Amino acid sequence: MSQSAVAKRYALALFQLASEKQSIDALQEELDVVEAVFAQNDDLIEVLTHPKISTNRKKDLVRQTFSTLTETVQNTLLLLLDRHRIQVVGEITREYRALANEARGVAAATVYSVKALSSDEERAISETFAPKVGKHSLYISNVIDKSLIGGVKLRIGNRIYDGSISGKLESVHRELLAHRS
C-alpha cells in the first residue's frame, strides 16, 4: 500500500475519533505540534527509523518528546512506530487538516502578493473568494512575490485567480501575439 493511502487511512481514523469526541480542532493543534517537531528535527526521523535502535527505546523517546500531548496522539505515534510507518506523520497531518477543513467549510488558499497582506486584506479576500469555491472561509497562506508588480494571485486547490499586473500584462501579450498573424 502506498504511503499516501496509509496516511489517508490513519488521518480518517483520527478524524472519526476526534469527531466522536468533538475535539477536531484540539487534535488538529496537537498534530500541528507533532509536524513542527518532526520538521525542526531532521534527526528525529532518522533515529526513529534506525534499524539498530530497539523499538522500546524509540517508544520511550516518543513518550518523552510528546508527553504533553493527548493519549490519542501518543498512541498513534507508537502504533506508527510498531508498524514501521513513522515517516508518514507529516502526510497524516496534512490529510487530517484537509478533512478538518472540509468539515469546517474552510479551503486552504495561497495568496501571492508583492507585500505582506494585512488582516483586513486577508479577510476581504476570504469573504470574496470563499463563496466562489463553495466554502465559508479561506485559510490564507501569504507568499511574497515581487515579480507580480502589483495586485494578487490566488490559488485555491487547483484553481488560480490572477489579478496581478504581471498576469494582465501577460494576457495582453498573448492577445497581441494571437492577432499578429
Image (cartoon, grey):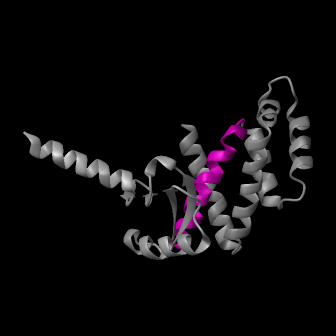
Q: Position of residue 145 (x, y in %)?
A: 51, 49
- Is residue 74 highlighted in magenta? no
Quadrant in which the C terminus is drawn: top left
Q: Position of residue 91 (x, y in %)?
A: 62, 46
Quadrant in which the N terminus is drawn: top right
State which quadrant residue 115 falls in: bottom right
- Is residue 96 highlighted in magenta? yes
Question: Where is 160 relative to 176, above or below?
Answer: below
Callout count: 0
Q: Is residue 83 left or right of residue 116?
A: right
Out of 77 and 140, give the one closest to the viewer. Answer: 140
Q: Which residues are magenta?
A: 84-105
State which quadrant residue 98 falls in: bottom right
Which secondary structure is most common in the magenta stretch? helix
Residue farthest to the left, as pictured: 181
Residue shown at 37%/57% (left/top)? 162
Q: Is residue 29 left or right of residue 163?
A: right
Residue shown at 77%/31% (left/top)? 49
Residue farthest to the top, as pictured: 52
Q: Position of residue 154 (x, y in %)?
A: 44, 59
Q: Is residue 23 left or right of residue 147?
A: right
Residue farthest to the front, as pictured: 149
Q: Is residue 34 left or right of residue 148?
A: right
Question: Where is 180 relative to 119, above or below?
Answer: above
Residue shown at 46%/46% (left/top)? 147
Out of 104 and 21, give the one closest to the viewer. Answer: 104
Residue shown at 50%/57% (left/top)? 113
Question: Where is 5 relative to 129, above or below?
Answer: above
